């Protein structure tokens, strides 16, 4: 039962003490988050992993790419554990390393050698990957002069990339790429979508000629559910409502909202509101419900009336958390996530560039 699991997790954590640190993503259910030593977005949690020098194990209650990032940033002797190995991210899975390498080869055929700078010192294409991608993709980006971004720093990262390249190949999330570039004044005609199934030549060259941002076809299955109609309904039913959505939402939704911003932006906006305010939020339901409980002076609701948790995050059931912790008590490390060195080194380069690019 839930009470039993709670007791087992608490007991195992007490036995392990400082030897383990449990990290919980904002999108995790309450029964998991309640056991987390740190709760945050994927970037904050990666940093939290860094600040736990005494921990032998980092139990990451999030999805696979986050655990990989924690492994990249933690010490080699620290084991990063993902309680359920089936907790992936459908968006991260939309950019496989094979597809991206294939795309890169085709871009080289269109633009010429991709590492050759022109008279202005700009290379033809800088690859930019969203944090929500595999370590292999981050490694690819690191090897090709590119950089990682999060939803909090996407604009600063695109500026970094435009200072070094004629254009950007942005993956996996088309919406974050489009929304960020649009806010920077890039016209939609200069943001073609890469189509891996379209053969090279012909329209591909024509479309890509004056591209500034080449978008990948990925999306977040949670955030793409939000609609302009939901915003219209919220405005009709709650005059004066403040609508804030995540930039992983489709462009029309971002345009119809009052503001768009990362998880961190949404939290800060609510925390900074001095007058009682009604907020309609377009992001994952567990986070919205937690914010609503945390700020009872405001009315805070999710734009999507049908509950929309992230189904893969949801795979971190408390039963798995109890299991991995009890295995640690017994001296066994299960579900360890390890990024091999040939991928890890360039992936760290791409992450370090992001850290140096300033948020
Ligand atoms: P952050 O955790 O970086 O806020 O990203 C949002 C998200 O979709 C998590 O998978
Ligand atoms: Fe991936 Fe979206 Fe879930 Fe985040 S919310 S883990 S981007 S599917």
Image (cartoon, grey):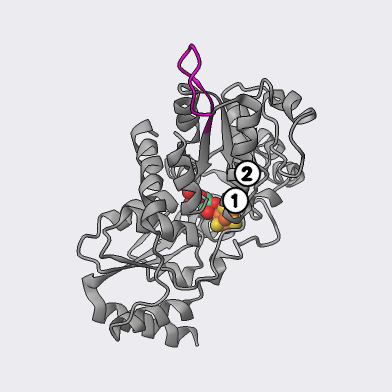
Height in image: 18 above or below 123? below
Circle number at residue 220: none
x 75%, y 24%: residue: 206
Residue 293: where, in percent of width, then height? 49, 59
x 61%, y 53%: residue: 91
The total of numbered circles placed on residues is 2
Q: Which residue is mark 2?
A: 102
* Residue situated furthest right in the rendering: 202
- Find residue 311 and report its image quarter: bottom right
x 42%, y 52%: residue: 343
Residue 251: where, in percent of width, then height? 68, 36
Mark 2: few/some/many CA within 10 Å (<14, 14-19, 20+) = few
Height in image: 65 above or below 320? above
Q: Which residue is mark 1?
A: 98
Name the image quarter holding the C terminus.
top left
Report the front residue among 149 and 15. Answer: 149
Report the front residue among 249 and 122. Answer: 122
Mark 1: few/some/many CA within 10 Å (<14, 14-19, 20+) = few
Left or right: residue 238 versus residue 339 is: right
Q: Quadrant of ligand 2?
A: bottom right
- Find residue 16 and report its image quarter: bottom left
| Secondary element type, mark 1 | helix
| CB under 8 Å between discs 1 and 2 | yes
The answer to if 348 sits in the magenta stretch is: no
| Secondary element type, mark 2 | helix
The answer to if 118 sits in the magenta stretch is: yes
Query: Which residues are drawn in magenta?
Result: 114-126
């Amino acid at each position: 039962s839930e009470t039993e699991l709670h007791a087992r997790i608490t007991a195992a954590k007490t036995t392990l003490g400082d030897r383990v640190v449990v990290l919980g993503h904002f999108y995790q259910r309450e029964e998991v988050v309640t056991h987390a030593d740190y709760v945050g977005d994927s970037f904050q949690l990666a940093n939290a992993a860094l600040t736990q020098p005494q921990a032998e194990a980092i139990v990451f209650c999030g999805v696979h790419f986050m655990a990989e990032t924690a492994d990249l940033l933690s010490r080699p002797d620290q084991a990063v554990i993902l309680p359920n190995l089936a907790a992936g991210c459908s968006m991260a899975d939309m950019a496989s390393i094979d597809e991206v390498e294939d795309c890169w080869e085709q871009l080289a055929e269109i633009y010429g050698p991709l590492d050759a700078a022109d008279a202005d010192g700009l290379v033809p294409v800088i690859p930019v990957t969203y944090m929500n991608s595999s370590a292999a993709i981050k490694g690819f980006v690191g090897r090709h002069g590119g950089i990682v971004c999060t939803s909090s720093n996407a604009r600063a990262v695109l500026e970094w990339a435009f200072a070094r390249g004629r254009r950007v190949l942005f993956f996996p999330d088309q919406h974050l790429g489009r929304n960020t570039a649009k806010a920077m004044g890039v016209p939609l005609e200069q943001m073609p979508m890469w189509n891996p199934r379209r053969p090279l030549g012909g329209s591909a060259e024509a479309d890509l000629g004056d591209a500034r941002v080449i978008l990948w076809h990925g999306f977040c299955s949670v955030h793409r559910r939000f609609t302009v109609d939901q915003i219209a309904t919220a405005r009709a039913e709650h005059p004066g409502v403040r609508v804030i959505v995540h930039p992983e939402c489709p462009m029309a939704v971002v345009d119809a909202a009052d503001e768009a911003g990362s998880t961190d932006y949404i939290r800060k906006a609510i925390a900074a509101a001095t007058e009682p305010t009604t907020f309609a939020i377009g992001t994952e339901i567990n986070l919205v419900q937690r914010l609503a409980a945390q700020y009872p002076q405001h009315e805070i609701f999710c734009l999507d009336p049908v509950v929309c948790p992230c189904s893969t995050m949801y795979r971190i059931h408390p039963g798995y958390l109890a299991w991995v912790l009890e295995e640690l008590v017994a001296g066994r490390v299960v579900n360890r996530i390890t990024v091999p060195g040939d991928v890890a080194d360039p992936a760290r380069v791409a992450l370090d560039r992001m850290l140096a690019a300033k948020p």
